[in-house]
Amino acid sequence: MENRMPREEGIDHSISLLKEGYQFILNRSEQFDSNVFETRILGRKAICMIGEEAAQIFYDPSKFKRNGAAPNRVKETLFGENSVQTLDDEEHRNRKAMLMSVMTPEKLESMIELTKMQWEKSLDQWSKMNSILFYEEVKELLCEVAFKWIGYPLNEQHVPKMTKELSAMFETAAVVGPNHWMGRALRNNVEKTIHQLIIDMREDKLKISKDTVLHQFAFHKDANGHLLDEKTVTVEIINMLRPIVAISIYINFSLLALLQFPEQKEKLKTFPDYSKMFVQEVRRFYPFFPFVAAKVKQDFTWNGYQFAEGTLTLLDLYGTNHDPVKWEDPYVFNPERFAHWKGTPFSFIPQGGGDYYLGHRCAGEQITIDVMKVSLDFLVNRMEYNVPEQDLNFSLDDIPSIPQSKIILDQVKRSRSHS
């Protein structure tokens, strides 16, 4: 039996989506008392979904496709043209295999060690400064880590510029006006830089070790044995660099959680396994990426609702991570919920859902967890700092959401037990 899907009246709700940010889908889901509803985005019909059951359908490749789903503003800032996030079927599997090929135990361990070293270096610098803007400093820290990890360490004087260019990709994707156009221009700058690196490597003008991420991507061959075109390689290398810098958002929220819930610090100092639970709860509780987009591949019916081929569909990541059906007291910060967590790849989806290799779950999710754990260890055990009076509020209307003050710290120094 076919049901009539709840529908939001009006000609277009794109501006509301940008204004309401992380709560756009959640607000309407509660209003309609439904995990699926119809609205209008970018002048066309769109379906919005929320929850584990919806995520399972959304990540079914027989029902949804990514090609043509992401709006231009997202491709021109966040993803880039012809990136893995916009591919389907065999083409997607081949490209995803390239990304997953560098997620080896050795490469992950290298990321942990590089992150530790960079924190040590940054801590020395911060201890000589009157105060720091934590969010901005951590972005630069991670930008240096990211380039070292792919095998092309940056000259120190180039770090601020490259940090600004990479972070603009995720900071301007959802804004309108001059800042968005600036984000596009800054992405173009990075693409030119990385594109030239690829050309120089292929023409043997630049010698990069064969076991680096940069070399593996530059000389990766597709299913037909052909080198990927330079533009595609450029986009996918940026798809490694940009998300590493974006972990700064989660690290900022990790510090905010320590400030908002001070009882957590003692648990982190006392129980060795607690950091993994804490990191997972930060990723569940605080906002990161609001939703993901796809298009209906072919007509199908789900829960009595008709999904027509070609319809834009948005899955709410933030809302699914706060779904009261799956999460007890979803708006309470409680790391211990992960002590015996028996969830699925569709109920906890801060960086996408489903399978790493076959699906669209973020290839770098383990890197995110590892980098957050290293950073948390420094915040809890290896450094001391003062938090002056400031505005620590963050808004769910802003994408990405970041505490207003970006967290100002002063009197930063190495912890006495680690000096």
Image (cartoon, helix red, strand yellow):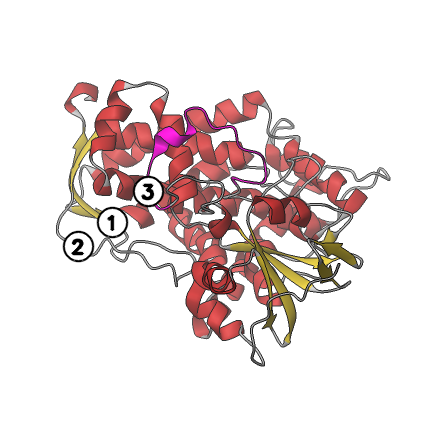
Side of 141 relative to 232 (left or right): left
Judge depth for marks 3 and 1 and give the one in front: 3
Judge depth for marks 2 and 3 and give the one in front: 3
Q: Which residue is mark 3?
A: 332
| Percent x, y of residue 180 | 48, 68
- Residue contact between numbered discs 3 and 1, judged by CB atoms under 8 Å: no
Mostly what secondary structure, the magenta segment?
loop
Task: Using the numbered discs, state the Cα–Cα distance from disc 3 to disc 1 in whole angstroms.
Answer: 22 Å
Q: Which residue is mark 1?
A: 407
As shown in the figure, which amino acid type bears the numbered disc 3?
Answer: Val
User: Image quadrant of residue 137?
Assistant: top left
User: Image quadrant of residue 42?
Assistant: bottom right
- Residue contact between numbered discs 1 and 2, judged by CB atoms under 8 Å: yes
Of mark 1 and mark 2, the one earlier in the sequence is 2
As shown in the figure, which amino acid type bears the numbered disc 2?
Answer: Gln
Q: Which residues are magenta?
A: 331-348
Crowd band around label 1 with a 10 angstrom C-alpha radius: few (<14), some (14–19), many (20+): many
Q: Secondary structure at mark 1?
A: loop
Along the viewing direction, whichever of 57 and 83 lies nearer the viewer: 57
Q: Which residue is mark 2?
A: 390
- Residue contact between numbered discs 2 and 3, judged by CB atoms under 8 Å: no
Of mark 2 and mark 3, the one earlier in the sequence is 3
Along the viewing direction, whichever of 208 and 74 lies nearer the viewer: 74
Tag count: 3
Along the viewing direction, whichever of 250 and 9 lies nearer the viewer: 9
Which residue lies at the image location 64% right of the left edge and 67% below the top edge?
Answer: 46
Q: Is residue 296 above or below residue 388?
A: below
User: Image quadrant of residue 161?
Assistant: bottom left
As shown in the figure, which amino acid type bears the numbered disc 1?
Answer: Ile
